[in-house]
Amino acid sequence: MTHKSKNILLVAGFIIILTLCYQLAISKTIALKKDYNSLIQEEELFKNTPKQLSLLMQKQKYYNSLLSKYQIKGGSIQNNLLKTVNTYADSNKLRVVSFLEPHISISHDLTIKTYQFTIEGNYNSILKLIHLLEQQTKFGEIINLHFEKKKNFKTNTYYLQAYILLKSFG
């Protein structure tokens, strides 16, 4: 055997021994280290559990107070919105012409509901209703408000209609 063939066998044997060492020892050590790190992270999460639980309880109390403050009691937001609009319309000489089913879309695990309704009446009363919906009840945000002046041909009078789109998350 020549020196060249001995060197080739030595290098080949070394590579084979390295792959065997990796397969039998090093790869298992790396997998165990990953498991150990994930267990350490879970342990940290469990250490903070009582603190997180108390924070969640405080958030629940806060959100419940918001719901009661803005009069969003049991039932759906759609029913509460319709009730608020009808109550305001009755007391301010407005008329609810239509109230359609909400359009529901899901984007990035977030449900977005868009409510569309039409109100007929005085311009100032409609604006006060919009202010009430956005600022005092917190049902959502008005994303479109379209006023349209129409004529009643039977009585030859004009009236104002507002088409309202209200976007709500959740």
Image (tube, helix red, strand yellow):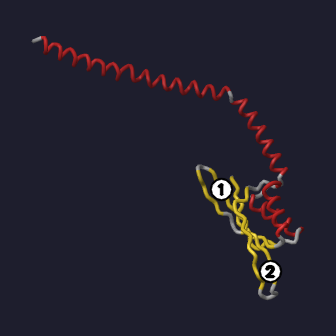
User: Vertical placement of 11 versus 78: above or below?
Assistant: above
For mark 2, does the 10 Å Cα neighbourhood hold few (<14), some (14 to 19), or many (20 or more) residues?
Answer: few
Inspect the image, locate mark 1, and give the three-letter code of the amino acid beneath it.
Ile
User: Vertical placement of 160 versus 138: above or below?
Assistant: below
Instruction: From the image, tell me which residue sits under label 2.
Output: 158
Mark-to-mark CA distance, 2 and 1:
35 Å
Inspect the image, locate mark 2, and give the three-letter code of the amino acid beneath it.
Tyr
Q: Residue at x 80, y 77 (%)?
A: 159
Q: Position of residue 88 (x, y in %)?
A: 86, 65
Q: Secondary structure at mark 1?
A: strand
Number of labelled discs?
2
Q: Position of residue 71 (x, y in %)?
A: 83, 54
Q: Residue at x 83, y 46 (%)?
A: 65
Instruction: From the image, tell me which residue sits under label 1.
Output: 112
Query: Depth check: 135 or 70 in front?
Result: 135
Query: Depth check: 89 or 123 in front?
Result: 123
Comes first in the chain, label 2 or label 1: 1
From the viewer's perspective, is 50 left or right of 89? left
The image quadrant that residue 8 belongs to is: top left
Of labels 2 and 1, the one closer to you: 2
The image quadrant that residue 41 belongs to is: top right
Q: Residue at x 71, y 33 (%)?
A: 52
Q: Secondary structure at mark 2?
A: strand
